[in-house]
Amino acid sequence: MYLITIADSINRILKTPVGSRVMRPLYGSRLYLLRDRKFSKEWQLLATRYVFEAISINEPRVKVDRVNFDTDPVKGTVQISVHLTNGETVEVTND
């Protein structure tokens, strides 16, 4: 039995840099590498790859179906929508 929801787990995974957790070097994602980079098609491809990798390694309860991005240029934020094969959608922001 899991004590944390899938949405909370995915939020934690994607906001934690890979290698920052002691005793769990694979936990987290590489999304931190994209910070301060220009939002472009290349950025979206890398972010999608990093989301798929992180969730497939760290969250055995679900699989990612697709990833969408919504930007707010005024606030400088990116919202990542992670659509899962179980029908759930998890929203993650870079705040």
Image (tube, rainbow, N blue to C red):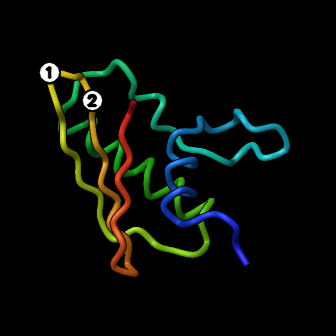
Checking the image for residue 40, the label placed there is none
77 to the left or right of 73: right
* Residue bearing the label numbered 2: 77
Q: Residue at x 69, y 36 (%)?
A: 19
Q: Find numbered disc 1 in the image and state the secondary structure of the residue it sits on.
A: loop
Give how far across and how far down residue 21 sits, in percent: 75, 38
* Residue bearing the label numbered 1: 74
Quadrant for the C terminus in the image:
top left
65 to the left or right of 24: left
C-alpha separation, residue under disc 2 versus residue under disc 1:
8 Å
Closer-to-camera residue (87/46): 87
Q: Looking at numbered disc 1 in the image, what kind of residue is underneath it?
A: Val
Closer-to-camera residue (37/68): 68
Q: Residue at x 24, y 37 (%)?
A: 42
28 to the left or right of 50: right
Q: Looking at numbered disc 2 in the image, what kind of residue is underneath it?
A: Thr
Give how far across and how far down residue 93 sits, in percent: 36, 40
Up-down relation of residue 89 to residue 38 (above or below):
below
42 to the left or right of 28: left
Q: Residue at x 37, y 78 (%)?
A: 85
Q: Find numbered disc 2 in the image and state the secondary structure of the residue it sits on.
A: strand
Q: Residue at x 82, y 37 (%)?
A: 22
Furthest-right residue in view?
23
Please tell me how crowded label 2 is: few (under 14), some (14-19), or many (20+) other residues with Cα within 10 Å: few
Please tell me how crowded label 1 is: few (under 14), some (14-19), or many (20+) other residues with Cα within 10 Å: few
Give how far across and how far down residue 8 sits, in percent: 54, 56
